[in-house]
Image: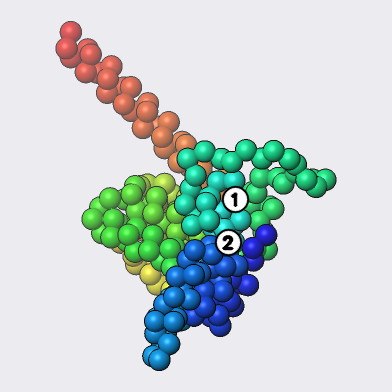
Amino acid sequence: MKRRWTAVILALFGGAFGLHRFYLRQPEIGVVYIFLMILNFTRFPLSAILGWYDAYRYLMMNENEFDRKYNSQNFRDRYGNRRTEPRVQETRRGKYILMDEDNVTTQGRTGYFDLIKSKKQSESYKQTGIKKFKDYDIKGSIEDFKKALELNSQDKALHFNLACAYSMEEEATKALIHLDHAVAYGFQEFDRILSHESLAYIRVFPEFEAFKNNQYRLTSSIVQSLEQRIKAEKELELEKLKSEKIILNQELR
């Protein structure tokens, strides 16, 4: 079982000699590093720079990615390339069979660099969501904001942006829920809630006033009242459409 941090340390301090490549069962590449070291013996070795680059790559990998590349011998060759067919395992050793990893079994394995990668990816989704929102692709912006939240669920700006998008889609309950989350995570620009053009739809509901009076926090009673009001309005609109259809049929006759 190869360890990511061991590979990082070997690449940093022994990368010029390809120690990390030998460690990761890549002796051919390790020999190339030694050859480069000999060629550049009188100057700063190119192999050392390559080793530092490898160390950076290992740092930016999460544990699952590193395991798939360097610890899954049945599905990867020594260069990390995927095999067309898995090698047949003739013998089973040990007492236990490894379980498939899920969210529970992989908890606690997220490191500092993994968090940085998640936040960068989340920010990327946020920016594409904002662009789509400005281009009036509201549904597309919602999808990107939701993807960003999966990577950074406590981003108050994301919750505020989602509230604006849901308000534009006239989904008042979801909009208020995300405004509540935004405030819970530290959003305090209440004047933007009261003046932002995209939130105009939800501000017309009496429940918004209750939300405002409760320091911009939701309660179950506010949500229940809002959902009942929306349901009643939809039923009223449906009855109106039925009446208009009956009148139109009569005129056609």
Residue 73: mark in rendering: 1
Identity of the residue drawn at 55% across and 80% down: 14
Which percent across, then down, holds residue 252? 16, 12
| Left or right of 225 on screen, residue 130 | left
Q: Where, quadrant-wise, is the C terminus in this rendering? A: top left
Q: Secondary structure at mark 2?
A: loop
Pick the residue in front: 244 or 133. 133
Which percent across, then down, holds residue 235? 43, 31
Mark 2 burial class by Cα count in 10 Å: few <14, some 14-19, many 20+:
some
Identity of the residue drawn at 42% across and 46% down: 171
- In the rendered view, would you say 188 is above or below 1? below
Q: Amino acid at mark 1?
A: Gln
Pick the residue in front: 147 or 204. 147
Identity of the residue drawn at 55% across and 46% down: 75
Question: Which residue is tagged 2?
Answer: 25
Q: Secondary structure at mark 1?
A: loop
- In the rendered view, would you say 71 is above or below 236? below
Identity of the residue drawn at 40% across and 72% down: 191
Mark 1 burial class by Cα count in 10 Å: few <14, some 14-19, many 20+:
some
Question: Residue lying furthest right in this view?
Answer: 95
Is residue 209 something one can see in this rendering?
Answer: no
**Pointer 1 and pointer 2: residues touching (CB < 8 Å)?**
yes
Residue 44: mark in rendering: none
Which percent across, then down, holds residue 40? 39, 85
Instruction: Report the number of numbered marks.
Output: 2
| Left or right of 10 on screen, residue 119 | left
- In the rendered view, would you say 151 is above or below 58? above
| Left or right of 168 on screen, residue 100 | right
Pick the residue in front: 13 or 118. 13
